[in-house]
Amino acid sequence: MARKTTKLAAVNRVLTNIGQAPTTSLIDGNPLVEMAEVVLSEVNVAVQSEGWVFNTEYAYPFIPDLEGCILIPDNVLSLDSNGRTNSFLVIRSGKLYDKAAHSYTFEGTQKLDVTWLFDFEDLPEAAREYITIRAGNVFAGRSVGSSEAVAFGQREEVMSRATLMEYDTQQGDYSIFNTNDGYTQYNSYNPINALRGY
């Protein structure tokens, strides 16, 4: 029976990409195992930073504390007001900062689009697979400097990314009609709506 990729299994695949024997534990003190785990973590952050359907939420409410500050959780990779306010909001010192008002203080709830960072084992299998293969290629390049090992895994990496993008497309149900721009463009080119004056 097929099982989802665990972090240990992912690290072992990264190790075997350079012909290294697998490990039974992530805390065995082997420098190569530790390096493989670090690379897997780096790639996990890099891939999730792109923003996918599984780690993006829209209009997520951030509520100010009693002093009017909004503390941002450590697992927030990025956020965007997406035109909901005239403010230019960024993360500074772990708090939400308004660059337009030059202030950390907010009067009400701020609804922001958020890209979250999740643990490896909380990701869908398509994401785990892509992250593992990409980490294996990065690890091979760093640890042995083998362009042959990296080149061998590049085709596999491209295929796994395509699988992840297919997953994201199916789960996201994306459409040009889900955005104001798409709706406006559709109406501007629709002759029936043009006759109706839309």
Image (cartoon, rainbow, N blue to C red):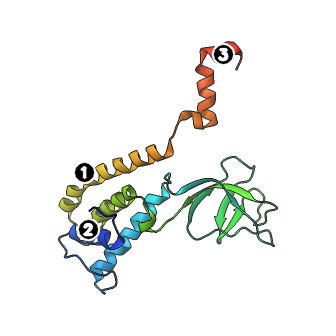
Dot 3 or dot 1: first in sequence order is 1
Q: Secondary structure at mark 1?
A: helix
x%, y% of residue 188?
A: 62, 22
Q: Residue at x 25, y 67 (%)?
A: 140
Mark 2 lies on residue: 13
**Crowding near the residue tagged with mark 1, few <14, some 14–19, many ≥20 C-alpha atoms within 10 Å:** few
Mark 3 lies on residue: 194
Q: Secondary structure at mark 2?
A: helix
x%, y% of residue 133?
A: 30, 60
**What label sits on residue 92 in the rendered view?**
none
Left or right relative to 193: residue 87: right
For the residue marked with disc 3, what is the amino acid?
Answer: Ala
* Figure disc tally: 3
Q: Nearer the viewer, residue 194 or 97?
A: 194
Q: For marks 2 and 3, give the CA distance.
A: 57 Å
Q: Nearer the viewer, residue 189 or 196?
A: 196
Q: Residue at x 30, y 70 (%)?
A: 9
x%, y% of residue 108?
A: 80, 60
For the residue marked with disc 2, what is the amino acid?
Answer: Arg
**What label sits on residue 155 in the rendered view?**
1
Dot 1 or dot 2: first in sequence order is 2
Which part of the image, by quadrant, shows the C terminus? top right
Above or below — where is 27 with respect to 161?
below
Q: Secondary structure at mark 3?
A: helix
x%, y% of residue 137?
A: 28, 62
Q: Residue at x 23, y 67 (%)?
A: 145
Name the front one of labels 3 and 1.
Answer: 3
Above or below — where is 76 with respect to 154?
below
